[in-house]
Image (tube, rainbow, N blue to C red):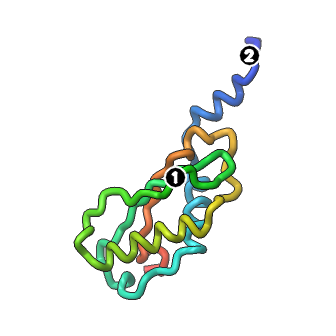
Amino acid sequence: PARLQPNSSQNQYQSQPMTMSEIDAIRYQIQQCWSIPAGARDAENLVVRIKVFLNSDGSLSKAPEIVGGNGASDPFYRTAAESARRAILKCSPLKNLPAAKYARWREITLTFNPRDMLGG
């Protein structure tokens, strides 16, 4: 059998992508802090993407950034995007992140859709 070099198992984990359940666990934590703005429920294509920058302890390394902004002129989009950004700030630090995969989640883009969160 081949000899394992020190840290080879750790390097193996860092090359593995985040699983959907791990990403969902991050999104779920933030959803608990997100109060969906009035009016967002009726917005057909109100999808907010936010890039989150994290330290290894789950705290924010810098402020979350709203990505894209296809509806930036839409007041419902701006309100929903800001409320999602505030939820990330409020929920920090995030918990139960897989330490071995820090290279994968130190910068992660999350997608928020109010219709999904309302069961629509």
Numbered label tally: 2
Residue 81 against residue 8 in the figure, above or below: below
CB contact under 8 Å: marks 1 and 2: no
Residue pictured at 53% horizontal, 70% vertical: 87
Quick one: 105 or 52, which is closer to the camera?
A: 52
Q: Which mark is residue 29?
A: none
- Considering the image in quadrants, where does the N terminus appear? top right
Q: Residue furthest bottom?
A: 38
**Label 2 belongs to which residue?**
5
How many residues crowd around disc 2 within 10 Å: few (fewer than 14), some, or many (20 or more)?
Answer: few
The quadrant in which residue 70 appears is: bottom left
What whole-number distance in Å separates the C-alpha atoms at marks 1 and 2? 35 Å
Kindly identify the amino acid type of the residue bearing the numbered disc 2.
Gln
**Image depth: mark 1 or mark 2 in front:** 1
Q: Secondary structure at mark 2?
A: loop
Residue 80 against residue 48 in the figure, above or below: below
Across and down, in percent, residue 38 comes to: 40, 87
Residue pictured at 26% horizontal, 68% vertical: 72
Residue pictured at 38% horizontal, 60% vertical: 66
Quick one: 86 or 71, which is closer to the camera?
A: 86
Kindly identify the amino acid type of the residue bearing the numbered disc 1.
Lys
Residue pictured at 60% horizontal, 74% vertical: 32
How many residues crowd around disc 1 within 10 Å: few (fewer than 14), some, or many (20 or more)?
Answer: few
Across and down, in percent, residue 8 comes to: 70, 23
36 horizontally vs 23: left or right: left
Q: Secondary structure at mark 1?
A: strand
48 horizontally vs 107: left or right: left
Q: Residue furthest top?
A: 2
**Label 1 belongs to which residue?**
62
- Considering the image in quadrants, where does the C terminus appear? bottom left
Across and down, in percent, residue 23 comes to: 56, 55
Q: Residue furthest left?
A: 73
